[in-house]
Image (cartoon, coloured by chain):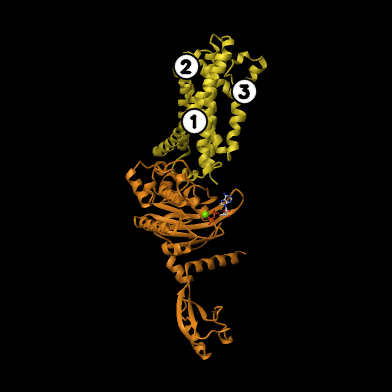
């Protein structure tokens, strides 16, 4: 096991984050604050409670997930795309490090950053809405699991993308719509029956529902199903990355 | 052609490479690199030098054949094999925002070595980069970036160092420094494989020479033996009276008359017992050609290289 190698990648990626710390922290805090002012205060005050939770509190888990998904994907995809683009990937390819170790370094760093960000957003939200976390262990577990899974997904996008457009296209055309339609701002029970069914094909629904359950004990779908779906996606991503490294997919000529 | 060596540090056996485009970049390359030598790989643009190096280093997959480095198969036992190898790539691929120090620390860690600030400091000092250790790489000149890449390659104390055109874009003084360092590394036991388009460099530095042309290794030879075997000697005679043409009786000899008619150049094979010089001089005096000076010279590696590539091209076409 090349521990020094994993640490080198992890530190390198974390340093990259902290170099742009203003932008990495300020942007999400600002965005979240805006969401709370608009949805929590302005609109939320006219909305009734959902399952006994005030609207302002109801949207917190969804907002955290929204940022978590975006940040995980963009961080991890950038982390592996940049060396490919700049050509510095030659060093990783010639290093005595396995695909698993490289992934631990890159995805570990991206997930760490996402979790830190999630906690930061939760702290920001606290300034607007007083909320309680019913199941702190599960709350953190969901945070971590989602951060790792979507960092892996981002890593795959970074492997696949061979230009900046491709790097943006999946987050923009698929992930953002899925998160907005994933029940961040509403309970899926509010939808017409047909759309309630359709929505179950959206993996983000399970994440947000499970995460919200850890806060308020209310969920749109069964909590076990939520965990199962997230783990399933994690395994799918891992399998793809394993295959990609094994075949040298878009890395080795 | 390759001499059997007792304990080669790099072994290539039957390496073929066909790129995804269908282009056949290497054809059945067999090569042994001796422990502790400086090996120069020469060949025109597109011959396959970088492809060969990338296969050994794990950046490119060979289509068939096997490679071992320090006794470890580079595919099956890639960890042990790669840990022994340092690579300075041909292109200047560097991070932009990292400092020199963090980038070489990263390289050392990536190759599985525990931190060693004293060693890294020595590497930077040897490459005259110590003053620049905190500079962002993007603020460095091209020649400095090249040295950063060398420092990265040396950061994990490799036994085998690949230098893919290290002198491209490096000024004369720096090039001398670099070659001094390469010689020092060799003294310390590092095996060095380099490519260059400056053939005098190979002539100066290398113990052995490999010439690759269109994906085929056409010659692997001890440098001195190569120069002896394929080298030609020339005798230049400065004439007392300019000539307009070579007399018919002398035209069978490989003689050339310079444009101004002042110098007669005779080319002969230094390996042959009979150089033909005595015969030439006899014929000259018979024709009343007098000379005031004579000078002999040997062909350079460059001449040999050019004629080898030329030969292989005519054989192929
Ligand atoms: N990724 C690739 N896909 C297809 N063909 C490639 C690829 N990389 C290199 N080639 C081709 O393989 C041949 C050998 O290239 P290589 O880079 O090994 O040459 P080289 O001897 O290093 O040349 P130079 O002196 O210019 O650096 C060239 O014809 C090149 O076009
Ligand atoms: Mg090359």
Q: Residue furthest left?
A: B118
Upstream in sequence: badge 2 or badge 1: 1
Q: Are marks 3 and 2 on the same chain?
A: yes
Residue drawn at (55%, 58%), measured in percent from left and top? B45
| Separation of marks 3 and 2 at Cα, in angstroms | 32 Å
Q: What tint does the image give chain B?
A: orange
Residue A201 is tagged as 3
Residue A126 is tagged as 2
Q: Is residue B210 above or below residue B83?
A: below
Q: Is residue B89 above or below residue A122?
A: below
Callout 3: SS: loop
> Does label 3 point to a residue whose CB lies under 8 Å from ligand 1?
no
| Separation of marks 3 and 1 at Cα, in angstroms | 34 Å
Q: Quadrant of residue A233?
A: top right
Give the letter of the chain under mark 3: A
Callout 1: SS: helix
Q: Position of residue A52 (x, y in %)?
A: 54, 8
Residue A54 is tagged as none
Q: Which chain is yellow?
A: A
Q: Position of residue A216 (x, y in %)?
A: 50, 13
Residue drawn at (62%, 13%), measured in percent from left and top? A190
Pointer 1 residue: A23
Give the letter of the chain under mark 1: A
Residue drawn at (56%, 10%), measured in percent from left and top? A51
Query: Looking at the figure, which quarter contains the C terminus of chain B?
Result: bottom right
């Amino acid at each position: 096991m090349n521990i020094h190698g994993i640490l080198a990648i992890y530190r390198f990626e974390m340093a990259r984050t902290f170099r742009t710390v203003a932008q990495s922290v300020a942007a999400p805090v600002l965005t979240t604050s805006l969401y709370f002012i608009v949805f929590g205060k302005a609109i939320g005050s006219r909305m009734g409670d959902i399952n006994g939770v005030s609207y302002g509190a109801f949207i917190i888990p969804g907002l955290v997930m929204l940022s978590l998904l975006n940040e995980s994907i963009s961080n991890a995809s950038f982390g592996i795309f940049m060396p490919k683009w700049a050509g510095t990937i030659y060093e990783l390819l010639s290093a005595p490090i396995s695909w698993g170790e490289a992934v631990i370094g890159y995805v570990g760093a991206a997930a760490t950053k996402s979790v830190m960000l999630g906690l930061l957003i939760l702290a920001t939200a606290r300034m607007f809405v007083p909320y309680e976390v019913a199941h702190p262990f599960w709350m953190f577990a969901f945070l971590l699991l989602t951060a790792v899974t979507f960092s892996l997904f981002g890593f795959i996008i970074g492997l696949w993308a061979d230009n900046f457009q491709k790097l943006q296209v999946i987050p923009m055309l698929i992930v953002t719509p899925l998160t907005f339609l994933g029940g961040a701002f509403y309970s899926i029970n509010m939808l017409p029956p047909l759309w309630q069914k359709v929505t179950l094909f959206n993996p983000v629904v399970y994440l947000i529902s499970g995460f919200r359950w850890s806060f308020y004990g209310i969920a749109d779908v069964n909590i076990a199903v939520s965990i199962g779906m997230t783990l399933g996606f994690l395994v799918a991503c891992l399998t793809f990355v394993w295959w990609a490294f094994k075949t040298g997919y878009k890395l080795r000529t | 052609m390759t001499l059997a060596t007792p304990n080669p540090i790099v072994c290539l056996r039957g390496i073929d490479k066909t790129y995804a485009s269908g282009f056949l970049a290497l054809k059945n390359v067999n090569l042994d690199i001796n422990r502790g030598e400086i090996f120069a790989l020469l060949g025109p643009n597109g011959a396959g030098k970088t492809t060969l190096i990338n296969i050994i280093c794990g950046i490119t997959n060979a289509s068939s054949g096997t490679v071992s480095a320090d006794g470890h198969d580079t595919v099956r036992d890639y960890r042990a094999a790669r840990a022994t190898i340092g690579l300075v790539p041909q292109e200047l691929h560097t991070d932009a925002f990292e400092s020199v120090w963090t980038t070489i620390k990263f390289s050392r860690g990536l190759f599985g070595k525990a931190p060693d600030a004293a060693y890294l400091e020595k590497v930077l000092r040897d490459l005259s980069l110590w003053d620049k250790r905190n500079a962002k790489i993007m603020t460095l000149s091209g020649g400095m970036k090249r040295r950063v890449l060398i420092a990265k390659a040396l950061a994990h104390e490799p036994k085998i160092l690949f230098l893919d055109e290290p002198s491209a874009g490096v000024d004369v003084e720096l090039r001398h420094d670099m070659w001094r360092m390469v010689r020092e590394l060799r003294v310390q036991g590092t095996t060095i494989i380099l490519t260059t388009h400056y053939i005098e460099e190979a002539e100066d530095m290398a113990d052995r020479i490999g010439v690759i042309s269109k994906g085929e290794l056409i010659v692997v030879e001890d440098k001195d033996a190569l120069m002896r075997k394929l080298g030609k000697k020339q005798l230049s005679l400065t004439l007392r009276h300019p000539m307009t043409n070579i007399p018919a009786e002398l035209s069978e000899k490989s003689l050339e008359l310079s444009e101004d008619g002042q110098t007669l150049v005779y080319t002969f094979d230094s390996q042959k017992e009979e150089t033909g010089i005595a015969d030439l001089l006899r014929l000259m005096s018979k024709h009343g050609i007098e000379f005031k000076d004579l000078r002999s010279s040997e062909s350079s590696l460059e001449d040999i290289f050019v004629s080898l590539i030329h030969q292989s091209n005519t054989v192929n076409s």
